[in-house]
Amino acid sequence: MVNYKDLGLVNTRDMFAKAVKGGYAIPAFNFNNMEQMQAIIQASVETSSPVILQVSKGARNYANQTLLRYMAQGAVEYAKELGCEKPQIVLHLDHGDTFETCKSCVDFGFSSVMIDGSSLSFDENVAVTKKVVEYAHKFDVTVEGELGVLAGVEDDVVAEEHTYTRPEEVEEFVRRTGCDSLAISIGTSHGANKFKPEQCTRNAEGMLVPPPLEFSVLEACEKNLPGFPIVLHGSSSVPQEEIATINKYGGAMKDAIGIPEDQLRRAAKSAVCKINIDSDSRLAMTAAIREVFALKPAEFDPRKYLGPARENAKKLYKHKILDVLGSANKL
Ligand code: 13P
């Protein structure tokens, strides 16, 4: 049993309370490897932003849970070495699928876990979320629940269609489970192809324009849960310049489209206090790597392509913090 406090990590409670009050959102960036972790920490230190390092089931399978835990512990020391006296870093389990997965993360040094019971019936979702909360709170670990279903693909989480959160259910869910934050579905989705072309319109240049987020659902949830921390998953904006670079250098990403950043800015000003971004980092890294491979085909030192990938991811993280989520200078 390892408690996150001994690793220098923090839970989300104070961080979210401040973010809701201050009208900004904390970035929750997924990581699977050292380069992403370094880029996230450099970006958050250089902008003085709190940050959530997020680990999915896929990441645990890919990188090994023990290594990821030590990397998060290393991230705290790395942030200090970069000049941040008191870093606020959360190690969060993304889309925990069972009580056992969540328990193993709590026991292993995570400071926050998500239990995703969104595919279950309301009562089953309440039951499993409550069980996770009761266990996690013994160790002061915070818990994110979810109501409503997001469309898209993220590692093992797949759904064809989205189902908006029903605002009339949120108060009862939070009261019965005791969860600390709630992920809701208002039209965001996982992955780099968030909408089918037939769901979109086209602008004068022929570019796809996605349907707007359902802000009325968010507003109704806020009304029923005043001041309660709300989470948005599936919030990559799928930068078209990265898609263009990928496709220019041999990629084949067709009709890739994300959530426009002005809508995320609007959400961040509300009770939305955690915004999940994974795909954008994958795109930034892939674009940089493809460019190196195309322009320097004789290159074979991984540092020569992973280095530019890390730089491009860092640029993206800083942009999100400074220009979209508003979490800069909130340490
Ligand atoms: P994106 O695929 O939009 O980056 O969403 C990531 C996410 O929600 C992780 O839980």
Image (cartoon, rainbow, N blue to C red):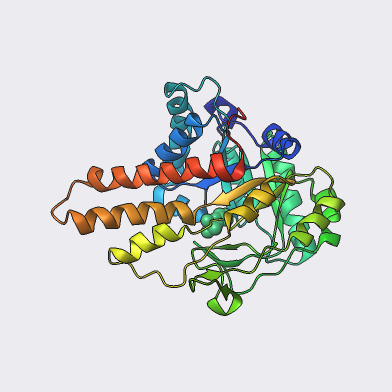
Quadrant (top left, top right, bottom left, bottom right) of the C terminus: top right
Counting from the top left corner in percent of width and height, residue 279 is at: 48, 57
> Which image quadrant shows ligand 1?
bottom right
Farthest bottom residue in view: 198
Q: Residue at x 70, y 52 (%)?
A: 145
- Which quadrant holds residue 228? top right
Image mark count: 0
Residue for point 86% across, 52% down = 223
Residue situated in front as seen by the camera: 14 or 284: 284
Residue 207 lies, with reference to residue 28, above or below; the image says: below
Q: Residue at x 49, y 28 (%)?
A: 76
Residue 274, relative to residue 117: is it above or below?
above
Q: Position of residue 97 (x, y in %)?
A: 61, 57
Please tell me in which quadrant of the rendered image residue 210 appears: bottom right
Side of 228 relative to 76 (left or right):
right
Q: Locate the N terminus and report the quarter of the image it occupies.
A: top right
Q: Please say whether residue 64 is visible from this viewpoint.
A: yes
In the picture provided, is 35 more to the left or to the right than 75? left
Name the residue at 44% across, 33% down: 42
| Residue 126 to residue 136: above or below | below
Point out residue 47 in the picture as x, y percentages from the top left corner. Answer: 52, 32
Residue 87 as seen in the image, left or right of residue 313 = right
Residue that lies at the very extreme toward the left in this rendered image: 298
Left or right: 74 as drawn, with respect to 177 = left
Q: Nearer the viewer, residue 75 or 278?
A: 278
> Residue 45, how many percent across, how many down?
49, 30
